[in-house]
């Protein structure tokens, strides 16, 4: 045996390399029955597949320009990363955007901007920006809720995202006074780190389902009573990534913990149905919303991607007739999101946010229902200029998903669907997610939201207003890409936004329904400017 080992050790390394390559060549030529390239070009053909596998990374870091990448280009990601780190998020030497391209956003600033008095909340705290409306107040719910932040975390389930990612986001939301939507995957321990929570009910009824997989009102009531951080409930009809198609959580992502939280079995793909089994039709949806609101006392809303409008028209008519209805509606743009989806759905099914929201808003405006509803927008709205446009169109709250993921370290690897996310954000792999420092990422989430709100407030003040809810469809222009003409949102989408009742930030600060765990004394206290941990001007 020693003689054999001695002989093998005496063979030069390059001989071993040649032997290895010969074995690969023999395999490629005589045993490979699937890949033409490696059969016809043994050994070197493998380079094609290796380069293809790292193609996204090559394009992201080497090939693509600052404005080319999708869904978020390098400039957009850079702003989010810098804001999350509370570093310099400015840019110099003017814009490098093509400001004459179609759908370019122009915000119409006022000749004289809004000047906040010395006792104004934003003179002391440039981050203070709650929602201008109260969820559930019109419908006289027992527990109305005013979101403490106009920018919040959209629906992303534990299971789709890792435990450390969810915990980082929730702790960050607590620091930023924002709410955290659970997604349809149920309420996990990682959602219960101190932030306000919006509990989402999807078609799989995860966390509130019986043994047969049907919705259980008893379990929902018990969940709400045991978790006072749950401030509102959202019924998901569809989502932008795959409207009309159920979700899939691969078996590889299902741990024992996820199995217990969702009340599902391990070892099998978890498939959410495309439609709800708890109700039928628009009338059934309305009754389902009211039953949940009456049973829990919480505001109840619906989330959907928008396509056909007939049922939305019917819902508005029933709301007028009955005096009842959802307390909030989240319009999810068809731009897609964190959920994995077939390309045909992500690319083509449902309308992008601007078309979806404008179509829906006009229906509820026609029926004089806009004051009863808190409108939530989502779909690549996680940058201040896009946020201002959304508020001008009639949005009251913005939810962000992918942008929030970027703030905690997502690198846009587009591996959310296969459990191999290199940043540990969208994977259940313990090793990959172990690199997430929860406390550090929570602070980054906090600063992303705060710097977003601060810049949105500054845009609002530049337009002469106190709160973004006062922005109108006349305050934002879109380039039509035709002879360099621009038109206001009002002209582009054929409606004027209904004025939102607003009596000043001080009234919001004193609101008894204000969420976000604000301490009213500290919320109105002057923020110091002497450390990196505080506000940057």
Image (cartoon, rainbow, N blue to C red):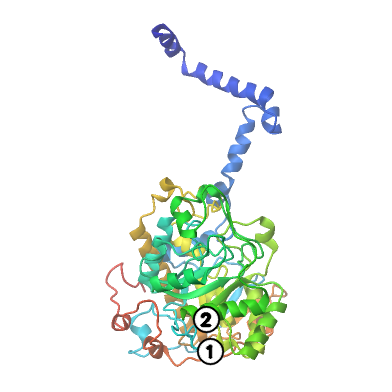
Asked whether residue 383 is in view, the answer is no
If the image is split into quadrants, where does the N terminus sit? Answer: top left
Which residue lies at the image location 50% right of the left edge and 63% below the top edge?
156
Q: On screen, 402 above or below 365?
A: above
The quadrant where residue 448 appears: bottom left
Residue 93 place in picture, x, y as percent: 49, 67
| Label 1 residue SS | loop
In the displayed structure image, the side of residue 71 where residue 135 appears, left or right: left
In this view, the residue in front, 267 or 363, is 267
In the displayed structure image, the side of residue 17 where residue 228 appears, left or right: left
Look at mark 2 in the image and give the residue it sits on: 396
In this view, the residue in front, 524 or 245, is 245
Instruction: Determine which of the numbered discs, if any, sits on residue 98 in the image.
Output: none
In the displayed structure image, the side of residue 498 where residue 530 appears, left or right: left
In this view, the residue in front, 320 or 530, is 320
- Ranked by sequence position, the earlier of labels 2 and 1 is 2
Residue 344 place in picture, x, y as percent: 69, 58
Look at mark 1 in the image and give the residue it sits on: 500
Which residue lies at the image location 37% right of the left edge and 74% below the top edge?
537
| Label 2 residue SS | loop
Q: On screen, 27 above or below 119?
A: above
Q: Determine the CA span between mark 2 and mark 1.
A: 9 Å
> Would you say the residues marked 2 and 1 are in contact, meaning their CB atoms lie under 8 Å apart?
yes
Residue 212 place in picture, x, y as percent: 57, 60
In the displayed structure image, the side of residue 216 where residue 351 appears, left or right: right
């Amino acid at each position: 045996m020693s003689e054999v080992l001695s002989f093998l050790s005496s063979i030069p390394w390059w001989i071993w390399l040649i032997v290895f390559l010969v074995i690969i060549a023999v395999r490629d030529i005589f045993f490979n029955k699937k890949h033409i390239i490696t059969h016809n070009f043994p050994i070197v053909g493998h380079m094609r597949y290796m380069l293809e596998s790292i193609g996204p990374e090559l394009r992201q870091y080497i090939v693509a320009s600052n404005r080319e990448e999708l869904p978020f280009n390098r400039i957009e990601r850079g702003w989010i990363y810098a804001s999350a780190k509370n570093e310099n998020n400015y840019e110099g030497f003017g814009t490098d955007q093509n400001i004459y391209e179609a759908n370019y956003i122009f915000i119409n600033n006022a000749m004289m901007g809004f000047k906040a008095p010395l006792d104004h909340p934003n003179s002391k705290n440039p981050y203070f920006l709650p929602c201008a409306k109260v969820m559930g107040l019109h419908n006289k719910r027992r527990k109305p809720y005013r979101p403490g932040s106009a920018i919040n975390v959209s629906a992303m389930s534990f299971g789709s995202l890792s435990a450390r990612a969810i915990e980082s986001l929730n702790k960050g939301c607590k620091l930023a006074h924002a709410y955290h939507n659970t997604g349809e995957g149920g309420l996990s321990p990682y959602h219960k780190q101190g932030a306000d929570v919006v509990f989402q009910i999807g078609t799989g009824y995860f966390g509130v389902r019986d043994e047969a997989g049907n919705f259980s009102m008893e379990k929902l009531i018990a969940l709400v009573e045991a978790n006072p951080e749950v401030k509102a409930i959202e019924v998901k009809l569809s989502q932008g990534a795959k409207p009309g198609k159920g979700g899939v959580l691969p078996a590889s992502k299902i741990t024992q913990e996820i199995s217990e939280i969702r009340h599902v079995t391990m070892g099998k793909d978890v498939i959410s149905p495309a439609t709800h089994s708890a109700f039928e039709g628009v009338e059934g949806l309305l009754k389902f919303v009211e039953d949940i609101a009456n049973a829990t006392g919480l505001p109840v809303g619906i989330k959907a991607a928008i396509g056909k409008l007939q049922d939305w028209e019917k819902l508005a008519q029933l709301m007028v007739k009955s005096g009842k209805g959802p307390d909030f509606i989240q319009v999810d743009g068809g731009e897609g999101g964190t959920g994995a989806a077939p390309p045909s759905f992500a690319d083509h099914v449902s309308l992008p946010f601007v078309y979806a929201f404008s179509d829906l808003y006009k229906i509820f405006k026609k029926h004089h229902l806009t004051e009863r509803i808190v409108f939530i927008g989502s779909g690549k709205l996680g940058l201040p200029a896009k946020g201002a446009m959304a508020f001008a169109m009639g949005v009251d709250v913005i939810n962000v998903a992918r942008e929030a993921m970027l703030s905690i370290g997502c690198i846009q690897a587009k591996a959310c669907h296969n459990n191999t996310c290199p940043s540990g954000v969208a994977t259940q792999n313990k090793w990959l997610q172990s690199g997430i420092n929860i406390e550090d990422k929570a602070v980054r989430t906090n600063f992303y939201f705060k710097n977003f709100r601060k810049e949105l407030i500054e845009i609002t003040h530049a337009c002469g207003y106190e709160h973004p809810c006062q922005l109108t469809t006349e305050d934002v222009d879109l380039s039509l890409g035709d002879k360099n003409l621009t038109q206001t949102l009002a002209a582009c989408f054929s409606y004027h936004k209904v004025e939102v009742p607003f009596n000043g930030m001080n009234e919001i600060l004193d609101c008894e329904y204000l969420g976000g765990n604000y301490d009213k004394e500290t919320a109105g206290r002057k923020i110091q400017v002497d450390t990196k941990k505080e506000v940057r001007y």
